[in-house]
Amino acid sequence: MEEKWWQRSVVYQIYPRSFQDSDGDGIGDIPGITSRLEYIRDLGADAIWLSPIYKSPNDDNGYDISDYQDIMAEFGTMADFDAMLEKAHSLGLKIVMDLVVNHSSDEHKWFVESRSSKDNPYRDYYIWREGKNGGAPNNWGSCFGGSAWQYDEKTDMYYLHLFSKKQPDLNWANPVVRDEVFSMMDWWLQKGIDGFRMDVISLISKPDGFPDGELGPNGYASFHLCANGPHEHEYLKEMNRRVLSKYDLLTVGETAAVTLEEAKSYANLDGSELSMVFQFEHMDADFHPVLGRYAEQHKNLPKLKEILSRWQNGLEGIAWNSLYWDNHDQPRVVSRYGSEKPEYRELSAKMLATCLHMMQGTPYVFQGEELGMTNYPWTSIDQINDIESLGNYRAFHEKGLMTEAEGIEMMRHRSRDNARTPMQWDDGPQAGFTTGKPWLPVNPNHTLINAAEQVKRPDSVFHYYRKLIALRKELDVMVYGHYELLEPEHPALFVYTRTLGDESLLVVCNFSEDEQTYEIPVEYRGADILIANYPDAAPAGTLRPWEAVVYHRK
Ligand code: NOJ
């Protein structure tokens, strides 16, 4: 198969609100991004995924769009966008936009019309149902807590919102909605953007008949029952035929509740739907048995290995993987699977990077991950902005399942705001993010963890990521090699090989701060070390805390 540009690429994700402020209002913006593009080029990334920059009332920080063809005033203007795109392209960076079309904002003109009367031409752009037994049409819950249905007095009916009530779900069963979405996508592609990251795209086809589902601990059925619905692949194939196939794009579906089998359709190498998907199974590997993601992590390395390995092997030759630890919805991986201890933070950040980047698929780096940024030490619920963690905390708190102290603890481990604190550019005031008051607090550890310091220091996490990214450009075995997991049951070591013809890699990662005994397989003894996170080679038969070594055999 002919190689696609995104198969050898690394994507850098920007959360614009927290990346770089240029005008002192405490909110990141597009001119801020433009001013930092060289930094991303120097890291070696090929493409940037921009979280939404469209016009939005910001109920969910831009994931609630009120005009798909306009820019959020806080972020700048369309002229700012065009200038950013032009500069990015001149630096060899591609721009992948977020596409949020499972839902719009309730302030989008389509919804304003839709809710105004039952016979408005926009009525069927959204999903309206009569109530049942004096309540919602069914027992589905919103991802952000509470029912997924909102009663609307004007027409005495309910509309569906799998996220906040300000994010009504679009009705993909209506062909006119699909026409609108496809022509809007085409409009952006004509501007020259290079792809889309498609927000919760696995939810666009709702189950026939809207049946009740099994109740979860919060008293509602999970919105996951809307995932991979009956017309999902039909809609995506139509999108592909009518829009995507006309361009050379990177498309990545954010596919909540996707299974390996489903991914073989979504991300099939035949190019009939998307380039790849974000799966969530490995993100769920540390969930609490009852509270799910809203509790302290329950680390289980064998489970994490089983999941990642199943995806590595399952998609080989059939579909393409995406690789990620961090994004704007996840706590920071160093705090999650690594160590915040000063002596181990950088080692563990490099180990985690090694483990992920040596796998098959397209790696994504979330802003600050390349510095080993950590979770924020939240001390009060009032500091939290994230609608998801607040909504779920309130739901659990009201049911007596979580005290306030447990809530703060949960925020420290899990809140999406851990990813959203401002980018740490330097050790000065507000980490160089803004000259004003930042919309979320800057992590006090920016005096230790910041880009200015790391760019100068050759053994920093930043330069380690740079090396990993550069290696992918050189080595076919990193891109295409067959993956095999070794030591599946080992509680602390993640060991695997990648093999392409006579060339192979042995990747050995210690996910603990304890020394581990490990004899590398004979065939790798004496092999070159491709990259490692300690300056000197490990003593034979031992791995030091958080050590990562990649052996290369040719
Ligand atoms: C997934 C996005 O990544 C998340 O940030 C957002 O809240 C939901 N989709 C709803 O759009």
Image (tube, rainbow, N blue to C red):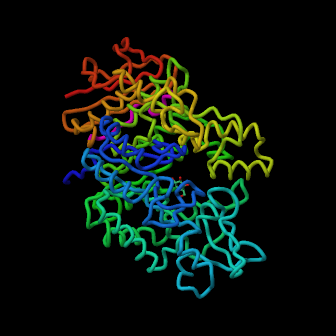
Q: Determine which quarter of the picture holds residue 537.
A: top left
**Quadrant showing the C terminus:** top left
- Quarter of the picture containing the N terminus is bottom left
From what the image shows, is residue 28 above or below residue 453? below
Q: Position of residue 112 (x, y in %)?
A: 59, 75
Report the front residue among 304 and 252. 252
Asked where in the image residue 58 lies, by quadrant, the reply is bottom right
The residue located at (33%, 43%) in the rendering is: 10
Instruction: Provide residue 445's location: percent of width, then percent of height.
Output: 55, 26
Q: Nearer the viewer, residue 313 or 150?
A: 150
Q: Position of residue 363 (x, y in %)?
A: 36, 42
Find residue 390 and report its horizontal and vertical position in percent: 68, 49
Residues 37 and 479: in front is: 37
- The residue most toward the top is 539
Q: Is residue 267 visible?
A: no
> Residue at horizontal 45%, vertical 43%?
22
Relative to 199, 158 lies left or right? right
Where 245 sits versus 122, above or below? above
Report the magenta residues as a range.
Answer: 481-492
